[in-house]
Image: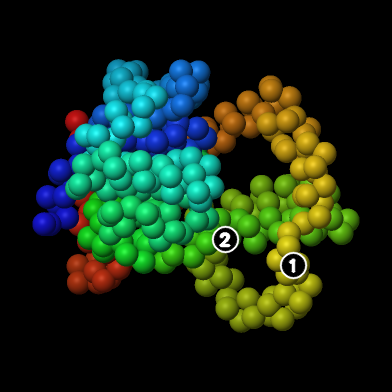
Amino acid sequence: MTVEYALERIQKIAVVGGGLMGHGVAQFFAQAGYPVAMVNRTAESSARAMAAVARGLKLFVEEGLSTRAEADAALGRIRPVKDLVEAVHDADFVTEAVVDDLELKQKIFREMDAAAPAHAILASETSGLRMTDISRDTARPERCVTTHNYTPPPLMPVVEVVPGERTDPAVVEVACALLRRAGKEPVVCREIPGHIGVRLTTALRREVNHIIEEGYATPEAVDTVMRSLGRLFPVMGVCILTDFTGLDMSEHSQRNVLPHLDSRTEGSEMIRKMVAEGKLGVKTGEGFHRWTPESARAVYEARGRELLRWMKQPPPPAPWKTLEDTPGEGSSRKEAGGKEAAGNKK
């Protein structure tokens, strides 16, 4: 069976869990033309998820990336349901997006495995667990794969595609092709805790916590530096930035700075204390900063508009992308079976 045939066979999507990540996954698949069944436990959680999708689609309209008619059509393709079997029994691609609890995910994968068609691909949005473990009790571990988006999924192009030990390589290719068709940028990663992005942000947060804990700088100072420094990364990434800075300079930094960085594996006592005090961030009104509903909403909206601006005017292509576009060059870097987003379903 070719990748193209398997991709064309995917006509219906199911998303199990419409929370922080799941409703965004449902949104971008619906925007790509796929009917989506979105599972939530209660009518109230379904209503919240659908309202979140509506807000997300409204941003696309306001920024000129979608017409009102296209947004309405996308919203109409999402069917909220409470019964998992009803959602997945005729789905061709099923993705689970619940909290990162291994036993819970294993239970849901057993249920998805029992109810979904034999040809369906079962995916997880896990950011830190192994697909090998999640799919352990299924009858189809070869058709199980991690497809990890970053929040908010409709606005973040990259998706980490991570096979388990028994995942069929063809399933990885089909998942990547499906994501490309939905306008995403899949990146294949070996099975390691945290994949790529979460490992990077966890390392960054550890040092941020250390700087604040030791009194070297305030949270305000750290965020001010990162909001400026971070402007480089959408254009250059880390490895390109290092190439431009010079690996000899990077070697100097390693020698001069690495011995002074935090290397603890048990995490930050400051964070543990803040959690114990109920300072969980925006959700409780205080974390590193104090939050009101209005100030939090302002940041959410600013984030959305900035990410949409990048969608309208993306940075120059990375050097390996330029190679791919050159005849006879870089073909080994391409992932097999991809149709670009221009091939979206209608």
What residue is rendered at 19% in x and 37% in y?
11
Q: Position of residue 38 (x, y in %)?
A: 37, 29
Q: Is residue 321 visible?
A: no
Q: Nearer the viewer, residue 284 or 322?
A: 284
What residue is rendered at 49% in x and 60% in y?
195
Which is more N-terminal, label 2 or label 1?
A: 2
Q: Nearer the viewer, residue 144 or 115?
A: 115
In which quadrant of the rendered image does the N terminus lie? bottom left
In which quadrant of the rendered image does the C terminus lie? top left
Q: Position of residue 294 (x, y in %)?
A: 69, 22
What residue is rendered at 72% in x and 81% in y?
255
Compared across the picture, whether 242 is left or right of 81 comes to right
Q: Position of residue 18 (x, y in %)?
A: 45, 31
Alpha-carbon span between mark 1 and mark 2 = 15 Å
Q: Which residue carries the number 2 mark?
A: 199
* Kind of residue at badge 2: Arg
Q: Secondary structure at mark 1?
A: loop
Compared across the picture, whether 203 is left or right of 275 comes to left
Q: Which residue carries the number 1 mark?
A: 264
* Kind of residue at badge 1: Arg
What residue is rendered at 73% in x and 69% in y?
263
In the depicted structure, whether residue 344 falls above or below residue 243: above
